[in-house]
Image (cartoon, helix red, strand yellow):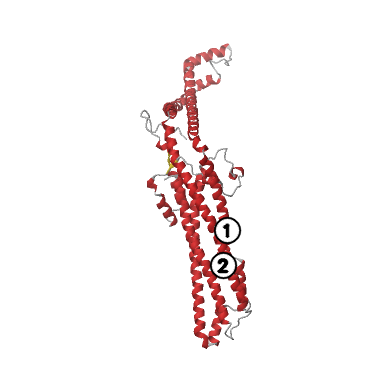
Amino acid sequence: MTPGSLMALVEDNVRHYENILTGLQTTLSKATAQDMLLTQDTIANLRRIEAAPIEHPALDQQVRHALQERQQQESKYRAQLAEVENDIAQLVSEFRALVNQREQRLPQLWQAHILHPDYTSLMRQGQDIIQARQRLQDSLAQLIEERDKKMPAYETNPFYVYLRTRRYGTDDYSRGRLFRQCDDWLASKVNYRENRRNELILRSMPDSVATLVEAHNARLLTLDEQNVANWAKAGGGLRADATTLRRTLLAKQIIAAKTRANAAYDQLVLFIDCEDSYTQDIERWIDAQLGNHSIDDILEMLVNECPEHSNTLNQYWSKLADSSNRVEGLEENVDKALEDYHHAKELEWGLRTLREEETDCGEQCTCACHRDENFQGQCPCVYDDERYYTYPPELDCTGLITGYMKRNLALDDLMSLFNDQRLSFNDQVPEPATTAPGAATELSSS
């Protein structure tokens, strides 16, 4: 499982739930329009009953005309959205094909890189330095232990400390003849000169060895930088070919198309939520025809006052109730589908955020996210799926996504798995026969 194929799985999961949501929203919008038309038809039928308090007969045609215009306008936005979605599907398909090509070529380039004599030489040098450094670190630990064990003897001898404070035996020592004779006698008693030499060795040896360890670390860093430069040169052809530019352009087109799709959906959702101007006019005109009553109140009144029409009125009542219940049921289904869609989107952006944290675009990237720290939009960087690792087959990414959508796994659980279970190209480097197990782990190769 490559990073690109995992992202495709996550995106397809979002698309699946988006299609479910779109289908339910379309059904709900049609049901809402049918419910308003049924209400107007019922009002028109009730107008034939003399006792019915129905007003403003001219509004009947206005409601019907508005329903037609509403349907036409909604269909227009749906067509716009469908056209943009089709563009997005084509762009994403081409983008994924390019990502797949690059993900097939990257391991090939990597294998050629690690088989190159320069790589082998750098790794062997690194392993030798690591082994030598380990020996130094072991010696350093022993020297520190020996120093800490022996130093109290030097610090607790008052005569020795007195002579050391006087800087006896150094060029800075300056005393009169009598005091010098006394200090010479005292130094001979505590064997000062030899003990002072041993103390200085105890103090200096750990620092000397630590300096050697740092020198080995610096050498390892130099080797690592050289190896990175060699890999950059080996993969430079892939990063500079025409597919790189095409992939970046496709990412920009995908972002632009999704922006257009969001704009079309923002218009469409007004109709789905009955917040469009047509629906508001229709509801206002229906209310005007009913006066200060609801249609249920009028039906109940007419059943009592006009028993000869009770069968017909009860049919109207039943149809309106069925229509209202259907709309309410669809609204609940849409809410559930919208929740699932948002849940799927959270997974997509969780993975993109994880990728963003490990992305180093380099100085050549001119995306807005690098120029403006407060940038909130999408950048082509987000679509950079070029990674030097894969995921093990046993991770079962499809099953994990399914478990996440069933709410059996939290987003943090998945992000931890996708972060911890990566199998980097470096993990697949064969170790030379002369290398001790694990000796190469500290010299990175990319």
The answer to whether residue 150 is above or below residue 303 is above
Answer yes or no: is residue 348 visible. yes
Residues tagged 2 and 1 counted as in contact (Cβ below 8 A): no
Residue 218: give its label: none
Q: Mark 1 packing: few (<14 Cα in 10 Å), some, or many (20+)?
A: some
Which residue position holds label 1?
264
Percent of width and height locating residue 341:
49, 58
Q: Which of marks 2 and 1 is in front?
A: 2
**Which residue lies most toward the left here?**
433
166, 379: nearer the viewer: 379
Secondary structure beneath dot 1 equals helix
Percent of width and height locating residue 197:
48, 18
Q: Distance between the residues labelled 2 and 1?
A: 15 Å
The answer to whether residue 446 is above or below residue 49 is above
Residue drawn where x is 51% and y is 85% of the image: 310
Mark sitting earlier along the chain (2/1): 2
Residue drawn where x is 45% and y is 42% of the image: 103
Q: In the image, 16: left or right of 278?
A: left
Q: Name the kind of residue labelled 2 in the image.
A: Gln
The answer to whether residue 191 is above or below residue 416 is above
The image quadrant that residue 305 belongs to is: bottom right
Residue drawn where x is 57% and y is 79% of the image: 43
Number of labels in the image equals: 2
126, 186: nearer the viewer: 126
Residue 71: give its label: 2
201, 87: nearer the viewer: 87
Q: Quadrant of the N terminus?
A: top left
Q: Mark 2 packing: few (<14 Cα in 10 Å), some, or many (20+)?
A: some
Q: Name the kind of residue labelled 1 in the image.
A: Ala
Q: In the image, 392: left or right of 256?
A: left
Percent of width and height locating residue 88:
52, 52
Secondary structure beneath dot 2 equals helix
